[in-house]
Amino acid sequence: MVHTRHLITISDNGQLNKMVQANSLVEYGSRRVIITITAIICALLEIVDTTIVNVSLNEMRGNLGATTGEIGWVVTAYAIGNVIIIPMTSWLSQQFGRKNYFAASIILFTICSFLCGNATTINELIIFRFLQGVGGGALLVTSQTIITESYPPEKRGMAQAIYGLGVIIGPTLGPPLGGYITTNMGWPYIFYINIPLGIIATLLTLEYVKSPKYGEKSKIGDIDWVGIGLLAVFVGSLQYILEKGQEDDWFNNSTIVMLTVTSILGGFFFIWRQLTFRNPIVHLRVLKNGNLRVGTLFSFILGFGLYGSTFIIPLYVQSILGWTATQAGMLFVPAALTTAFMMPIIGQLIQKGFKQQYLVAGGLVLFFFFCFWNYKLLTTDTSADNFFWPLILRGIAMGMLFIPITTLSLSTLKGREIGLGASFTGMMRQLGGSFGVAIIITFMARSNVHHQADLNIHLDATNPAVQYKVAATTQGFASRGMNYFDAKQASLEAIGHSVSRQAAVLSYMDVFLYVGLMFLACIPIILLVRGNKKKKGEKLDLSNAH
């Protein structure tokens, strides 16, 4: 009797193991390599397209006959499409199956890339960019989920290192790639290059990517259409405010005021709806997980630093030093290679049990030093060589931040919760970037006015030093053949331009100082996070298994 019961137990355990293996999304060998490459291609497609158009806007504007305000919508529409779809990605994967949804998103992104390149009016381009952003937002979050679940839990640090290569390097590749393609082939080709990669990614997805076994799909009557509408209103209005606020003079503009009120009300009712509706599209209760809450906060900070620094340095070298867009983009290549070098090292450290909190704290310290170095470095004629080591330091810091933040966020999640967690961290990273750029632009505009006023105080016409400078500059222009009146006018304009440049440099310095201090202030928060320890005798939980 004992032997029989023992045989039954063995048989049951064998069946259990077979069932777990059949339902597991963990891959091995060449299948895992192919799935990883597919997910990275998709993540890169999405992220590169957020920045690749920036250096081509002027050519688009001239070709399509658009105004400066209209052409800005090419960037804004894509960002709005991104942030609307990202929180819904987990729910949409459940409704249609992850493989089908992921493949459909790639197809939508690829078709819209072709349509963007073929656009003949600015309105067409804006519409197609929005739809491209809808497809792209799904690619980013779903890629992270697929990579995370393709690796066993003990190797997920390395999985996030591989995924992080695309997320960190993508924004850096965009400007130089866009500049090169626009100069040599024309702006439509910045969209056409997505087409072959999109076709390859679609075919690999249909062949290799698995869909987890979800519960029942929502019936048409159970779909939270109100929640979908409130989400679109909330994040769409918020993204518009962040993109256009400074340009439209913030709350002195009636549209910004109206959309601010709309976004606040939309956010309030969306949260209420998701907490009370029987079948919400975004399960906010997953944020009860302490690690995920901390991870979403630091994903926001990471997005702020990543996109903020990717925005501010090219702006400085182009507007102050007179570099081309391609030169500005190439400046980041050594830093991107450094991050690529750091990613597997950090992944290995996490795999060996090194605490994520300490790695994040180290990354925050290094990013502070990167910012403080730039604060001391910037002048009106800083050379390219001066940026090399600070940007290398930034590359190391980004490697130390991205993987630990992501693994910490998803470390205690299981099953469908992983997709939900990836959606939250992805959305917060994107919003962090939008907030970062908006705050930096606003801060710089106001800081510039303040510094210019301070510098103008010292331009006293009775000051001998000022008089000498005006006389010397006037004489210089006169020696080129100008009459005295024109030479003096040109001298005053040159001095005024010099003051404006100096004020602008001071405002750039302020940005680096305050962003650095913000990162430094976050260190105590991350050090207070408790590590995750497995409980002794912890049993296999099949309730959330796919």
Image (cartoon, rainbow, N blue to C red):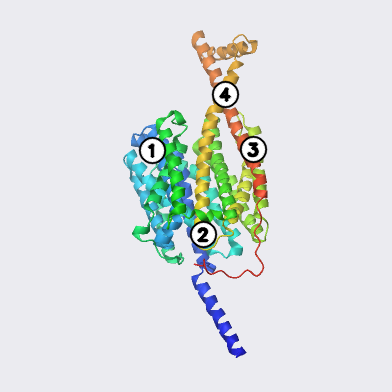
Residue pointed to by mark 3: 517
Q: Residue furthest bottom?
A: 1
Please say if the residues under marks 3 and 1 sit with CB atoms less than 8 Å apart. Answer: no
Q: Nearer the viewer, residue 74 or 85?
A: 85
In this view, the mark in front (4 or 2)? 2
Compare marks 3 and 1 and give the one earlier in the sequence. 1
Please say if the residues under marks 3 and 4 sit with CB atoms less than 8 Å apart. Answer: no
Please say if the residues under marks 1 and 2 sit with CB atoms less than 8 Å apart. Answer: no
Tell me which residue sits at (58%, 29%) in the image. 507
Q: Secondary structure at mark 2?
A: helix
* Residue 384 place in picture, x, y as percent: 60, 36
* Residue 144 place in picture, x, y as percent: 51, 56
Which amino acid, by three-letter code, is at mark 2? Answer: Glu
Q: Dividing the picture into quarters, in which one does residue 12 lie?
A: bottom right
Numbered tag placed on residue 328 in the rendering? none
Q: Nearer the viewer, residue 14 or 199?
A: 14
Which amino acid, by three-letter code, is at mark 1? Answer: Met
Numbered tag placed on residue 450 in the rendering? 4
Q: How many marks?
A: 4
Could you give the CA–CA distance between mark 4 and mark 2, rounded to whole angstroms?
Answer: 48 Å
Please say if the residues under marks 2 and 3 sit with CB atoms less than 8 Å apart. Answer: no
Q: Dividing the picture into quarters, in which one does residue 200 lie?
A: bottom left
Compare marks 4 and 2 and give the one earlier in the sequence. 2
The answer to whether residue 327 is visible is no
Which amino acid, by three-letter code, is at mark 4? Answer: His
Q: Secondary structure at mark 4?
A: helix
Q: Eyeballing the image, is 209 above or below 388?
A: below
Residue pointed to by mark 1: 60
Which amino acid, by three-letter code, is at mark 3? Answer: Leu
Could you give the CA–CA distance between mark 4 and mark 1, rounded to whole angstroms?
Answer: 34 Å
